[in-house]
């Protein structure tokens, strides 16, 4: 039995290949129970939180992502070229609330909307504390 070539180089007769190394930041506990949707040049890909590596032919690629609960949110897009043998890193962070866009880029991304979420939670806690203070 022969083993597949692990060198990352295509074997003779194989079409040239590159890779998109997509990291979906977060987890089911820290982001959303539903994994964000990934479209590579318009084709939906199966993904999971964490690292997802896709072999792709060299050329121009569009990565579109969004998260969906009752509606689509956290939309983000990135376009780039992949050369033969090249691995292109892509990082996506879903927003903390459903009212912000997602963040996508070639380096680790900060989670959008964290400040807005904290501000809303502080206001809610202050309102509840005020109601409790008035009733005591």
Image (cartoon, grey):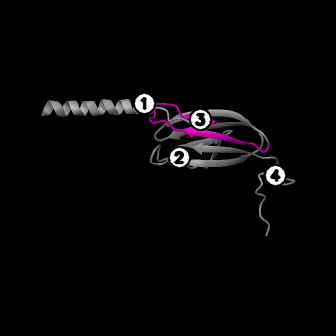
**Which residue appears farthest toward the left when viewing the image?**
136
Q: Position of residue 22 (x, y in %)?
A: 63, 44
Tell me the residue at 19%/31% (across/down): 131
Q: Which residue is mark 4?
A: 10
Q: Position of residue 3 (x, y in %)?
A: 77, 64
Q: Which residue is mark 3?
A: 104
Numbered circle sitting on residue 28: none
Tell me the residue at 64%/36% (across/down): 106
Q: Earlier in the sequence, mark 3 or mark 1?
A: 3
Q: Quadrant of the N terminus?
A: bottom right
Check whether the beta carbons of the residues at disc 1 and disc 4 lie within 8 A of each other: no
Check whether the beta carbons of the residues at disc 3 and disc 2 lie within 8 A of each other: no
Q: Which residue is mark 1?
A: 115
- The span from disc 3 to disc 2 (Cα, nearest Å) is 15 Å
Q: Position of residue 6 (x, y in %)?
A: 76, 57
Q: Secondary structure at mark 2?
A: loop
Q: Secondary structure at mark 4?
A: loop
Q: Earlier in the sequence, mark 1 or mark 4?
A: 4
Q: Which residue is mark 2?
A: 35
- The span from disc 3 to disc 1 (Cα, nearest Å) is 18 Å
Q: Position of residue 91 (x, y in %)?
A: 60, 39
Q: Is residue 26 left or right of residue 40?
A: left
Q: Earlier in the sequence, mark 3 or mark 2?
A: 2
């Amino acid at each position: 039995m022969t083993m597949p070539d692990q060198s990352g180089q295509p074997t003779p007769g194989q079409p040239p290949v590159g890779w998109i190394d997509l990291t979906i930041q977060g987890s089911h506990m820290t982001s959303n129970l539903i994994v964000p949707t990934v479209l590579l040049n318009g084709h939906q890909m199966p993904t999971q939180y964490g690292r997802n590596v896709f072999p792709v032919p060299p050329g121009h690629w569009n990565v579109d992502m969004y998260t969906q609960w009752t509606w689509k949110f956290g939309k983000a897009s990135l376009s780039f070229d992949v050369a033969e043998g090249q691995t292109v890193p892509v990082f996506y962070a879903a927003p903390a609330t459903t009212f912000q866009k997602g963040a996508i880029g070639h380096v680790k991304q900060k989670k959008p909307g964290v400040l807005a979420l904290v501000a809303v939670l502080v206001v809610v806690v202050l309102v509840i504390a005020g109601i409790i203070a008035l009733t005591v």
